[in-house]
Amino acid sequence: MARILALVVCLLLFSTNAKAEDRFELGAYGGYMFGGSVEGESELLTSKASIKSAPSFGATVDVALRRGAFAEFAYTRQATELTLRQSDGVTYRYDLLVQYFGVGGLLEFRTGSVEWFRPTFGGTIGATVFTANDALASYEEWRLSLAFEGGAKIRLTNFLGLRFRARAFITFLADDSAMFCASGAGCAFAYSGTPILQGEVAGGAYLSF
């Protein structure tokens, strides 16, 4: 009986460790994203487009590759407002939806014997989707983007944890970015290779399987 009990304990310990090290995680979070801005010019005018800071939310899927290393698929959504100010004094406003889709990696670090607190660092590459609407026009643009993050996980149980992070998003505009131009009369401004920078602070929970 003692041998059987010892065998059962060993199996439970093994399954617990396997679950802790070999898993995939589903996470959801809410946060606040800080707006970015970009400038452009034509032969006659200059303009500045600004994204208003607003709440954000999203989800992550992490697949364990090895101890402390994950492949990550991330989605972030922000409903906000875009303001375009031209040098002739005219101002335009759009309802703006910003969506980030990314794939990349996440590193998780252990601090000595402390298993419940794990600093994290990661990054993704993907696409930003800008969708802008006003009374006269609607634009949608897909642009290349990068995201970098630092944060921490707090492991509550074998299957539940909290995750906090701060992220920086970089989206690269191409020539003739119509969404950042005056509505009604078409696109008058070109933004060639100009990056838009946004920051986010967020927190949420994740399930580990």
Image (spheres, rainbow, N blue to C red):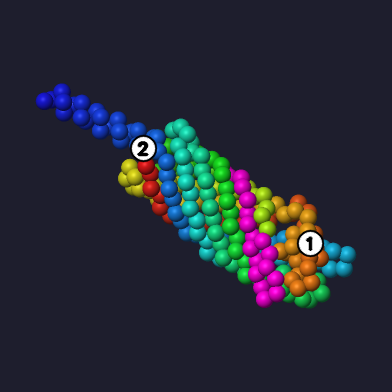
- Image check: 200 left or right of 117? right
Magenta region: 123-140
Relative vertical location of residue 144 with respect to residue 35 in this rendering, above or below: above
| Residue linked to disc 1 | 40
Kindly report the secondary structure that dominates the magenta region of the rendered protein.
strand
Asked whether, in this view, residue 191 is left or right of residue 146, the answer is: right
Residue in the picture at 63% in, 51% down: 127
Label 1 amino acid? Answer: Gly
Q: Quadrant of residue 22?
A: top left
Q: Which residue is mark 2?
A: 20
Q: Taking the image as drawn, is residue 202 in sight?
A: no
Mark 2: secondary structure: helix
Left or right: residue 165 versus residue 23 is: right
* Residue 34 found in image quarter: bottom right
Q: Position of residue 109 (x, y in %)?
A: 46, 38
Query: Considering only order in the chain, which callout, 1 or 2, is on the residue closer to the N terminus?
Result: 2
Q: Is residue 96 magenta?
A: no
Give me the C-alpha separation between circle 2 and circle 1: 50 Å
Q: Identify the residue at horizontal 35%, vertical 33% (top origin).
A: 18
Q: Residue at x 39, y 35 (%)?
A: 21
Report x, y in % for residue 149: 55, 47
Mark 1, secondary structure of its residue: strand
Q: Residue at x 66, y 73 (%)?
A: 134
The amino acid sitting under disc 2 is Ala
